Image: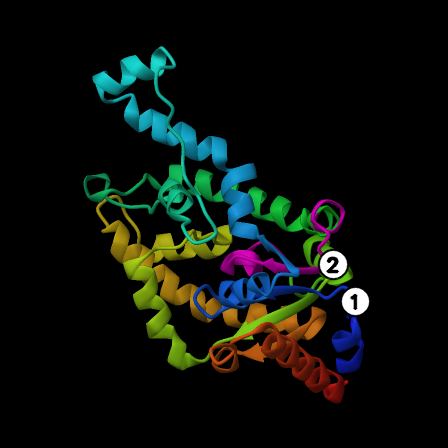
Amino acid sequence: MIYDSPQAWRQAPDKRITFFGMSGLGKTHLSQILRGNGDWFHYSIDYRIGTAYMGEHINDNLKRHAMREPFLAKLLRTDSIYIGSNITFGNLSPLATFLGQPGDPARGGLPFDEYARRQELHHRAEVNALLDTPFFIERARDIYGYDNFVCDTGGSICEVIDPEDPEDPVMATLAANSLPVWIEGTPDHVETLVARFAHDPKPMCYRPEFLNEKWARHGGEDVDPNEFAIATYRDAIMARHPRYAAMARNWGVTVAAADVATTRDASDVTALVAEAIGKRRGRT
């Protein structure tokens, strides 16, 4: 780890951390606390994915739908209107909508092959966005004068890396440039996370083997896409937990979601991470 003790972390003139874990447990909450402190750069992986790497795919999909309406089609052909997504740190709906859900087209579902193709696009985009972290660390310092840096990852980071591979290129890059910090949930969080997802679906990226197994079991052309998405998300929470645990064990430290929920300012975040480093060092 780039900080070998709580003291090294507290005294570091350039604190750099990467939060990971399930969506809804506090990654963006902590990142926004640090950003609001005034001397931290907040790098959102999902925002980077949706703008730099998936922006054209998202916008082309919007135009494809608009072209079905003759009034809009004429305007698009003559470059009379502009259609584009408005992704923000807090609104990832354009990306989630593009990714869609597989299932019955009459209920808004995508053919499974098309859904799998979009998943592969997201997989590549997520890897690229994560590997961009060192560039943004330097960019934050060079352009904006920020020495402190927080990388706010998507919940699907564990789907695009091998947590047991000591040479995994994504994790090796993140750990060489920041301290990976897992926000660990508990079984009590499962239904809360599922309810949040059902109300406001987040962009989801699944390992092909996981997705194919779920589709073989529960999928089909007439399946309700929302029901399939929610059931798959619930299973993903359970499947991801050991992968996150391996990431923390091999590359970083762990903090509890319950402690994250009580964090109110940058000094609280610093203390939370310092305590996690101390616990990690106590086990090694």
| Amino acid type, residue under disc 2 in the picture | Asp
Query: Among all residues in the image, which is located at the extreme top?
Result: 78
Q: Is residue 150 magenta?
A: yes
Local packing at callout 1 (Cα closer than 10 Å; few below 14, some 14-19, many 20+) is few
Disc 2 to disc 1: CB gap under 8 Å = yes
Could you tell me which secondary element the residue under label 1 belongs to?
Answer: loop
Name the residue nearer the viewer: 79 or 164.
79
Q: Position of residue 130 (x, y in %)?
A: 63, 51
Name the residue carrying label 2: 147
Q: Secondary structure at mark 2?
A: loop
Kindly report the distance in space between the C-alpha atoms of the residues bearing marks 2 and 1.
7 Å
- Amino acid type of the residue tagged 1 in the rendering: Pro
Name the residue: 61% across, 46% down.
129
Please state the horizontal and vertical placement of residue 277, each as a whole percent of the image: 71, 80
- The residue labelled by disc 1 is 13
Residue at (35% x, 26% y) in the render: 63
Q: Which residues are magenta?
A: 140-161
